[in-house]
Image (cartoon, rainbow, N blue to C red):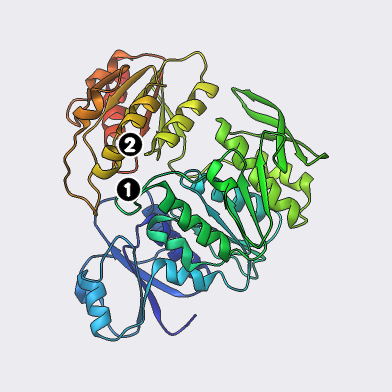
Amino acid sequence: MDNTTTYYFVGIKGSGMSSLALILHDKGFKVAGSDITQYTFTQRGLEQAKIPVYPFDEANIHEGLTVIAGNSFTDDHPEIKKAREMGLPVYRYHEFLGKLIEGYTSIGVAGAHGKTSTTGLLSHVLSGIAPTSYLIGDGTGKGTPNARFFVYEADEYRRHFLATKPDYAIMTNIDFDHPDYYKDINDVFSAFQTFANQVTKGIFAWGDDENLRKLKTDVPIYYYGTSDRDDFQARNIKRTTKGSQFDVYYHDEFLGNYHVPLFGEHNVLNSLAVIAVAYFEDVDLDAIKDELLSFKGVKRRFAERKVADMTIIDDYAHHPSEIRATLDAARQKYPDKKVIAVFQPHTFTRVIALMDDFAKALNNADVVYLTDIFSSARESNGKVSSEDLAKKINKGGEILKLDNMSPLLDYHDAVVVFMGAGDVQKYERAYEELLSHLSLKDN
């Protein structure tokens, strides 16, 4: 690390990039960056930290910068290209993260699904007990002086997590995703196996995942779950409209009764993984209980608000497994309300690869609406449409357009779950505005 340079982030609004920028800022380093001018949910933290954010322009690049390049951008990006031509130090995001975690008790949270929620929960719990730095994939990052722990989200996309070698790893699951990069589930497994080989102290893995059970490593693997073959077990689970409660055992040792104000079976498992890590780091388990109770969640994961008589939930779910988990959580918290899903499919390759699974997962809602497919920076078009997915859905499937959200006005005292990793929030805002105007007229 260098106090004389400015760390300049190309793509600073990216969820991991903004988190990393905030960590460096907290540590007293000079930070700036560039990105699109469109508002994103990650930028509020950057604004509050007064980190300068400029529109993309190669004129932003000058002597005295150390450039950290977002993984969404190739070396042909004008700013990255100019930085290399000038001979400035240029790091990819994951390369820089790999260097940053050295010297701490580091815990990487990996998995096709559940990374962000689990990283957020672990960061919250450990921060209440010991100095902790953390990088969460919702744009949240903190660099704490004299930190004991460094918790970070370990992203498997393009094998980026292989740039890091943590002390511990939590592995929530292995599933086929990112079909624009991975060939099949075996390709995904090979990435996780390589990552597992780089962990230096221990791995905590979900016991019901067949692929996680196949991992072979030199460090111990502790499985967590709800079956007798798991090392850490959640027993006597009670899921109510207030949250989830369960007993925790390490083999036959009772570790206490825990309550989390979270919904969905996946959050019981995420909490269990956090408790397991804390147990092996000799953290006071009574303190863990208190910290779990005060967790408020992470951005864009089951974020709720009430407008008129409707409950609106915003969630990042963009894979069938995540959709199932989010709808399960909505059913737990609102067992007596109709659940309406509004889903924005994310990337053409994912829709093609997982079409039938998407339809099955979405049919867990009472009614399903779709938006057009969000094309990422990596794909601008494809040979599939939301209409193709709609034909496989038996709980609706009407395509919503931004200038006409009125079909959602047919529902009252119900739950609308907006899901997607793109810009589904613009549909949510349009619906909320429509609802607000109508409720004002009714009053």
Give the mark, 2 or 1, whose residue is nearer the N terminus: 1
Residue 83: tell me if it is visible: yes
The tag on residue 179 is 1
Q: How crowded is mark 1: few (under 14 residues within 10 Å), some or many (20 or more)?
A: some
Whether 355 is drawn above or below 186: the answer is above
Task: Name the amino acid type tagged 1.
Answer: Pro
Q: Residue at x 20, y 71 (%)?
A: 78
Q: Quadrant location of residue 240?
A: top right
Q: Nearer the viewer, residue 118 or 261?
A: 118
Say which quadrant the C terminus sits in: top left
Q: Which of 261 and 342 is in front in this view?
A: 342
Left or right: where 17 falls relative to 379: right
Q: Nearer the viewer, residue 205 or 406?
A: 205
Q: Residue at x 22, y 66 (%)?
A: 56
Task: Name the amino acid type tagged 2.
Answer: Leu
Q: Distance between the residues labelled 2 and 1?
A: 9 Å
Q: Are marks 2 and 1 in contact (CB under 8 Å)?
A: yes
- Pointer 2: what residue? 354
Q: Which residue is drawn at 27% across and 81% down?
A: 84
The tag on residue 216 is none
Residue 252 at x, y = what percent?
A: 82, 39
